[in-house]
């Protein structure tokens, strides 16, 4: 089987506009959650989110191109540009066969919410024929990979994948399969999302999934596995990983961050929004990923949890980890970096996969902040690296994502051995 390695990383998140800034913030336990600034949320029950701050996409792409993109696509374009640069690749490299042997797979849970809102306002409040002409091209999920392909002359398969909050993880798994199969040699894989809008906050709020009691203390709102948790905090952003066939990467002298060792996916077949409380669906995804990577549970040193900070998710995910890892679950270091970024939906799995790669590289377990009192009553009794990150050798790291509809995805990375 063709080995797949990671040769580049790019990210735009609520805690940083690069992978370096994001990683440094997470290691320091810095929260990116604050009062919403993108719209007037004074009349909303939920007034906080993990927004991307001080973002200027024109550092990476032309202003003319950016005007034709929704916010989530701008994030994807910037993260892709960073990742390509980090991997030592450029648009010029894509002129020949490499451009045909490079693909794009991006997870997008929803798409251009702000475009939909503004277009519908014109439709209802002005006239049907006053809808902006680029409304559809800007709001549909596939426009993220579509625009990235045009920006960087990438002519291999380009696709968007939507499995709700598992989208970014499943996009990585799909890219892994594409490279292993020999269809492509390189892939830009990850996710992008931006749903911090009036409609987005309202729609998730009425589902009673968002934290609403911490409007005056936003940095404390996301508290996975803690007794006081009450819901997730909306986040936004993008992360893109450059995945590459090992021999192809070595031939061009690329720096290799880690090996992408395995992927597993499953469905709960249980409920449209809630995970199965017994964790069986997610456990199956972990077991499949371990089998795909040809690893035993004991090989995993770090697990980046989905860890949304909702009353239902955290006990269910803990049960899932125990079911899949057995007694090793109590030896694992587990953390939810959503405690700092919020839940970035379709981008979450990609951001957290990049975190796993950095954790392996630097030998550091990032913390779960706001974990003041673990919810032992509901079984949350594992080592979630509470509040302060710790150093330690990491040879194998895994990340799991659970999406509305019962989608479960798990990816595994290992320290690269030449």
Image (cartoon, rainbow, N blue to C red):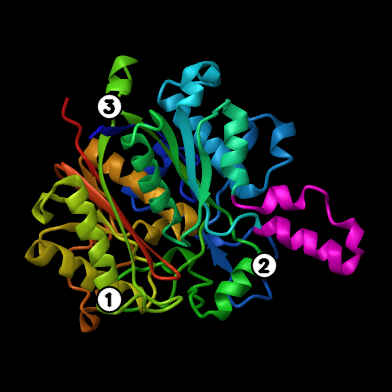
Magenta span has 25?
no
Q: Is there a contact, CB below 8 Å, between mark 3 and mark 1?
A: no
Q: Real-space Cα distance between discs 2 and 1?
A: 30 Å
As drawn, the label of residue 315 is: 1
Q: Select label 3 or label 1 by which is in front.
A: 3
Task: Calculate the distance from the C-alpha at mark 2 to the C-alpha at mark 3.
Answer: 45 Å
Q: Do the numbered discs 2 and 1 sit on residues whose CB atoms are within 8 Å?
A: no
Percent of width and height locating residue 403: 42, 65
> Which region shows up in magenta?
113-141
Q: Which residue is mark 3?
A: 246
Q: CA distance from mark 3 to mark 1?
A: 38 Å
Which is nearer the N-term, disc 3 or disc 1? 3
**Marking on residue 198:** 2
Residue at 39% x, 74% y is: 310
Between label 2 and label 3, give the one nearer the viewer: 3
Residue 371 in the image: state x and y as whole percent.
29, 68
User: In which quadrant is the C terminus drawn?
Assistant: top left
**Would residue 133 be counted in the magenta stretch?**
yes
């Amino acid at each position: 089987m063709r080995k797949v390695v990671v040769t580049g990383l790019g990210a735009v998140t609520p805690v940083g506009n690069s992978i370096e800034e994001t990683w440094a913030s997470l290691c320091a336990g810095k929260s990116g959650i604050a009062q919403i600034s993108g719209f007037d949320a004074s009349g909303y029950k939920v007034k906080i989110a993990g927004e991307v701050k001080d973002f200027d996409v024109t550092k990476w792409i032309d202003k003319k191109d950016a005007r034709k993109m929704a916010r989530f696509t701008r994030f994807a374009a910037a993260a892709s540009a960073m990742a390509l640069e980090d991997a030592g690749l450029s648009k010029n490299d894509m002129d020949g066969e490499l451009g045909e042997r490079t693909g794009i797979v991006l997870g997008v849970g929803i798409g251009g919410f702000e475009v939909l809102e503004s277009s519908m306002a014109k439709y209802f409040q002005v006239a049907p024929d006053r809808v902006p002409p680029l409304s559809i091209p800007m709001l549909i999920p596939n426009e993220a990979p579509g625009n990235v392909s045009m920006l960087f002359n990438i002519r291999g398969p380009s696709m968007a994948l939507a499995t709700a909050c598992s989208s970014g993880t499943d996009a990585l798994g799909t890219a892994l399969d594409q490279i292993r199969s020999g269809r492509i040699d390189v892939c830009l894989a990850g996710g992008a999302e931006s749903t911090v809008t009036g409609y987005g906050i309202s729609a998730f709020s009425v589902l009673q999934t968002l934290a609403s009691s911490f409007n005056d203390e936003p940095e404390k709102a996301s508290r996975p596995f803690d007794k006081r948790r009450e819901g997730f905090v909306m986040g936004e952003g993008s992360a893109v990983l450059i995945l590459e066939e090992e021999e192809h990467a070595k031939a061009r002298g690329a720096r290799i961050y880690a090996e992408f060792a395995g992927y597993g996916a499953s469905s709960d077949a249980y409920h449209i929004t809630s995970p199965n409380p017994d964790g069986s669906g997610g456990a199956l995804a972990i077991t499949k990923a371990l089998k795909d990577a040809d690893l035993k549970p004991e090989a995993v040193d770090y697990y980046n949890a989905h860890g949304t900070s909702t009353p239902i998710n955290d006990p269910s995910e803990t049960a899932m980890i125990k079911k899949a890892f057995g007694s090793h679950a109590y030896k694992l270091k587990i953390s939810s970096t959503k405690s700092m970024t919020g839940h970035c939906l379709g981008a979450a799995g990609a951001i957290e996969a990049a975190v796993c790669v950095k954790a392996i590289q630097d030998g550091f377990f990032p913390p779960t902040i706001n974990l003041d009192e673990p919810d032992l009553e509901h079984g949350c009794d594992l080592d979630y690296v509470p509040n302060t990150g710790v150093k330690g050798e990491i040879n194998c790291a895994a990340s799991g994502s659970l999406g509305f509809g019962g989608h479960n995805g798990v990816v595994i990375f290992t320290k690269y051995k030449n």
